[in-house]
Image (cartoon, rainbow, N blue to C red):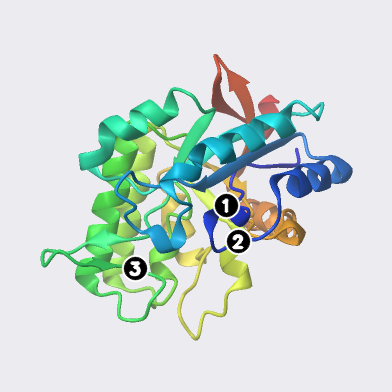
Amino acid sequence: MLYNLHTHSHYCGHGSGEIAEYADYASAEGFEVLGFSEHCPFPTELFHRTRMPFAMMGTYEKDVRARASEHSFPVLLGYEIDYSEEFDSYFRTVLEHVDYLIAGVHFVACPDGTYHTPFNPGFSDDDVRRYADAAVKVMETGLISFLAHPDVFLCRRRFDKVAEEAAITIASAAAELSIPLEINGNGLLKGNDESEGYPSPCFWHIARDYVSTAVISSDAHTVKNLDRTLPFCRAFASDSGFDVLDPYVKDGRIAFRKEQES
């Protein structure tokens, strides 16, 4: 099944391409499902440099819905959230009028009030532990259809004992809560500078002790990358011993089934 549920466009502020361009490309390439998941803005404009303005949400949502009416395959409306308990009710309100939410931990809150990101060098052992805790917390909310790039904390780090503990924390929680984890192709397009990088074979080797299925996504930020890494993600899943999950819509929400059950 050819699908992608983790898709960004010009709306995110660090991507490119119109929603219509992605949908037309997906149609031409034979996609069976395409989901848009722009980074969900905060009413306070927190992390505004990598989010669309809060006031633009309505424009984005109308754009996706308009494209959905033009194509015979499902074009779905979603958001990628950075969860904060302070905004729990806000995210639940957003979920009421979209098709799905996913979550990615892009920032961890530090005791001194600052935020650290795994995309920058210097992501410490304590940051990794905070990352794992944040990943578990958002899975516990029941808001999300899957956890995006669970291994992104290795973007600028080597795999070590702390990373192993984080992998166990995340994968065991995913198993307990029945939240799929995502094999993310966008990491393949980044230089890892001798870091572990993602998707991480070490992370997924550990995860296999807890879960046997995974979602695959390109995490595209340009039209040409919509399906560029999907064949690798599928091969990575197979080589790592995971069954790829196929999405479908159930009771107005995204659900998943194993390929062999499709």
Asked if labels 1 and 2 touch by Cβ distance under 8 angstroms, the answer is yes
The amino acid sitting under disc 2 is Gly
Left or right relative to 197: residue 109: left
Q: Which residue corresponds to mark 1?
A: 11
Please state the horizontal and vertical placement of residue 188, each as a whole percent of the image: 61, 69
Above or below for 88 versus 134: above
Residue 13 drawn at (x, y percent): 53, 60
Residue sitting nearer the eye, 48 or 141: 48
- 28 or 134, which is in the foreground? 28
Which of the two labelled residues, at mark 1 and mark 3, occupies the earlier sequence position? 1
What mark, if any, has residue 84 been given in the picture?
none
Q: Is residue 55 visible?
A: yes
Q: Give, as a three-letter code, the residue at label 3.
A: Thr
Residue at 57% in and 39% down: 59
Q: Quadrant of residue 228?
A: bottom right
Check disc 1 and report its element: helix, strand or loop. Answer: helix
Between the C-alphas of marks 2 and 1, the distance is: 7 Å
On screen, residue 114 versus residue 43, left or right, reads left
Q: What residue does disc 3 label?
A: 117
